[in-house]
Amino acid sequence: MDLTFCGAAKIVTGSCYWIKTGKTQILVDCGMFQGSKKTNRRNYEPFKFKPEKIDYLFLTHAHIDHSGLIPKLVANGFSGKIFTTDATIDLCEIMLEDSAGIQIMETEHENKRRLRQGLPPRKPLYTIEDAKNSMQFFEAVEYDRLYNINDTIEVRYRDAGHILGSSIIELFVKENGQKKKLVFSGDIGQWNVPIVKDPTMIDEADYLFVESTYGDRLHEGVGLRNELLLKYTVETFKKGGKLLIPSFAIERTQELLYSFNDLILSGSFPDEKIFLDSPLAIKATEIFKKYRKYYDKEAKNEYEHPFTFPNLVYNHETEDSIKLNNYGKPCIIIAGSGMCTGGRIRHHLKHSLWDPKNTVLFVGYQAEGSLGRYILEGAERVKMMGLEIIVKADIRKINSFSAHADYPELIKWTQSFTEKPETVFVVHGEEKSAMALSDKLKELGFDCHVPEIGEVFTIGES
Ligand SMILES: [Zn+2]
Ligand SMILES: [Zn+2]
């Protein structure tokens, strides 16, 4: 069989592997490229495969960098099956529609510029209709169950502990009398975080595809989350300012709410409002409430309703979001997008970045080229929404909120294999962190390779 790395190779986003056997064509993930303009342009390139020839898509989880090109895939002729967990299906439904909205808005913006330059308008990558249309191809699978897909393909999903419904995929392919096992880590979560379970340990693989988002970084302990959250809140409130938290709608937001609830119940938290100012995150939180079956023991037992507490305000309407510009008291605003590339957070940044009273607190990965990355790396001025804005607000970061394992955890996870895989492909990381993880794994005796986008690898006889 031939395996092509269509994305997430020496880059974090665009996760997509194309596997072609004599009989079947499979994708694992069909993710969007996110980050700089140059990276985003990759989304408009034709697929490296023929969508109508793909029989199955095995989807690890709902994050857009893994699922975001599904509507494009369907619009270009895919009519196979998309297997993933029930929670992932529900999350994809809201995520893909939201993503279509962003595509349309960005294209309108770009087309105004193109018109002025005398260039023909561009079509959006996909429409809301395309996103809705994709949902008919999804089929739910359960964790830990082996599914016979056809007479040569079997698949099993294991909990990856990364976000609600996230999976590690074990794929068994029979070809020329040989059976090979491919393991795709998807995104691996951290151990001992609230809500989701710990990542599942896998003990066998012929070929392993391991993520390396934080292949060169160490998180501070998860236990420090609440302590730091309290510290930065108090510090901001003393200045009389707002604490802005750009947050991913899925998992990060719910973990933040979980921590705030913890802090409030412990009695140590200032009595001010926390605004969840993101319609998408509000919808995602509803899905979290529905899938209590996937919570870890603590989340199941400790709280009846971890996402509902007195100081928390769910801000659905745009007018309510705009009102926050003139909100005179200290408060916390959680809004998307997580990397400040779109969404309500940009309006809040526009109104708050220039004022030293305020604090911007990052709790997630900021891709190269994103506004969040510029701010985090200490830009003195940023250009956004047609304005140049001076950055005077305090900039803070809590690493332990990451939904990704750090390198000691990634190593711990790869060491659960009783025999070393033939090859470990180190993927889903910027070149530096992929190389760093690859070097560490090589020291432990693993045979590693860091692929490029477009690289084709032949497994077994083809
Ligand atoms: Zn992810
Ligand atoms: Zn990812």
Image (cartoon, rainbow, N blue to C red):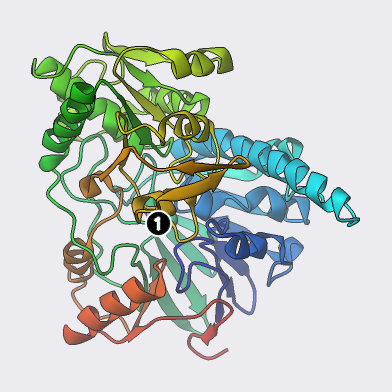
307 is higher (above) or lower (below) than 413: above
From where the camera sits, is residue 285 visible?
yes
Q: Nearer the viewer, residue 121 or 462?
A: 121
Kind of residue indicated by mark 1 = Arg
- According to the image, label 1 marks what residue? 156
Q: Quadrant of residue 293?
A: top left
Residue 31 percent across, percent down from the top left: 55, 56
Report whether 192 appears left or right of 336. left
* Residue 180 to residue 445: above or below: above
Say which of 197 and 440 sits in front: 440
Residue 445 in view, yes or no: no
The quarter of the image that holds ligand 2 is bottom left
Q: Position of residue 129 (x, y in %)?
A: 75, 36
Q: Residue at (60%, 77%) from the top-left corner? A: 21
Q: Position of residue 390 (x, y in %)?
A: 44, 43
Q: Quadrant of the N terminus?
A: bottom right
60 and 236: which is toward the camera = 236
Left or right: 84 in relation to 396: right
Is residue 4 placed above or below 335 in the rendered structure?
below
- Does mark 1 have its CB less than 8 Å from ligand 1? no
Which residue is at the far top?
310
Q: Quadrant of the C terminus?
A: bottom right
Q: Residue at x 8, y 19 (%)?
A: 268
State the image quarter where residue 295 is shown: top left
Image coordinates of residue 185 in percent, x first then y, are 36, 62
With 263 as the anchor, is 352 left or right in this view? right
Q: What element does badge 1 sit on?
A: strand
